[in-house]
Amino acid sequence: MLRVLFVGDVMGRPGRRALGSLLGALRVQYGLDFVVANGENAAGGLGITQDTARELFDAGVDVITMGNHSFAKKDAVALYETEPRILRPANYPPGVPGRGVGIFETPRGEKIAVINLLGRVFMDPVDCPFRAADAALSEVSSDAHAIIVDFHAEATSEKQALGWYLDGRVSAVIGTHTHVQTSDERILPAGSGYVTDVGMTGVLDSVLGLDRKLVIERFLTGLPNRFSVAEGAAVVQGVLVEIDLETRSACSIERLCVPEPNPLEADLPGDSGEGV
């Protein structure tokens, strides 16, 4: 049996702080073999940098997946070229730096394939995620004991459709991007774990991890303003997937929402989204 934790979109410094304080204990509590985290909002809520990636790895993350903000920071290209544990969506057009598929080993030697895909509905145009998934599976399917798909997409229908399309061919299809944890986790009929959105690792008393006052002001006035990452106590949201190594099927999938310890100490100076 393989126990994999997928951590929802890490939102800025509060999300990194919560993950750093909780992941070690979660590894012990749940006997985790492997941890994947979506890091496309890790640096000030937008993109990832060398330093923020290092924080996630130091916290205990094994692989970082990304999304539509993959290239928001200027050092992203160098990061993808030098760090194989960071994946950007596989359905970016040919020639884009980085890769969207990887095979990684657990401490016991099991091989886990991770595939990162980007949705097209209400998102920037990219290549077809369904066909990109087929291509990725032809590359890794015979070598992996488990296959985890991060589908970074906006539309519920597109996420559900990909889940059904890949049912029985992957261990789990995990939706990311909306930062709102959905309660539809299940094992599909052919054995793939599925959830529409795994949620967010960041400040819960916010709007998607952003300062709620600034977001409300935008809705009230319609005027552009600069959002910033919310401050305060954060949570780690994710799903724990148990995978049968013989069949590569999911045996169980469980939602997690864990508050960081010492929430009264969480409002630290300099935690706004203006920095990273």
Image (spheres, rainbow, N blue to C red):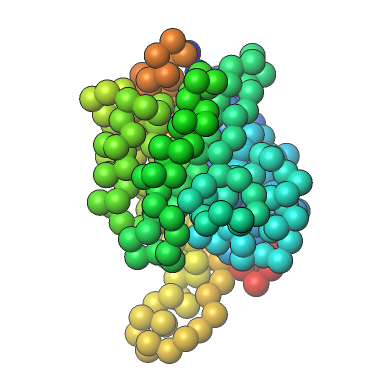
Write the residue at 42% across / 64% down: 125
Write the residue at 62% across / 28% down: 104
Comparing 1 with 93, the one in front is 93
Q: Is residue 190 left or right of residue 40?
A: left
- Residue 14, placed above or below residue 104: below
Q: Is residue 58 left or right of residue 148?
A: right
Is residue 15 visible to the viewer in this orientation of the structure? no
Write the residue at 33% across / 61% down: 121
- Tell me which corner region of the image, top left, top right, bottom left or bottom right, holds residue 213: bottom left
Q: Whole-percent x and y of residue 69?
A: 55, 61
- Give the mark count: 0
Q: Whole-percent x and y of residue 180?
A: 37, 53
Write the residue at 37% across / 22% down: 250
Is residue 188 visible to the viewer in this orientation of the structure? yes
In the rendered image, the residue lying farthest to the top is: 246
Assign the C terminus to one quadrant of the image: bottom right
Comparing 10 with 175, the one in front is 175
- Residue 3, placed above or below residue 41: above
Q: Whole-percent x and y of residue 152?
A: 44, 51
Q: Whole-percent x and y of residue 34?
A: 58, 27
- Tell me which corner region of the image, top left, top right, bottom left or bottom right, holds residue 122: bottom left
Q: Is residue 172 left or right of residue 83?
A: left
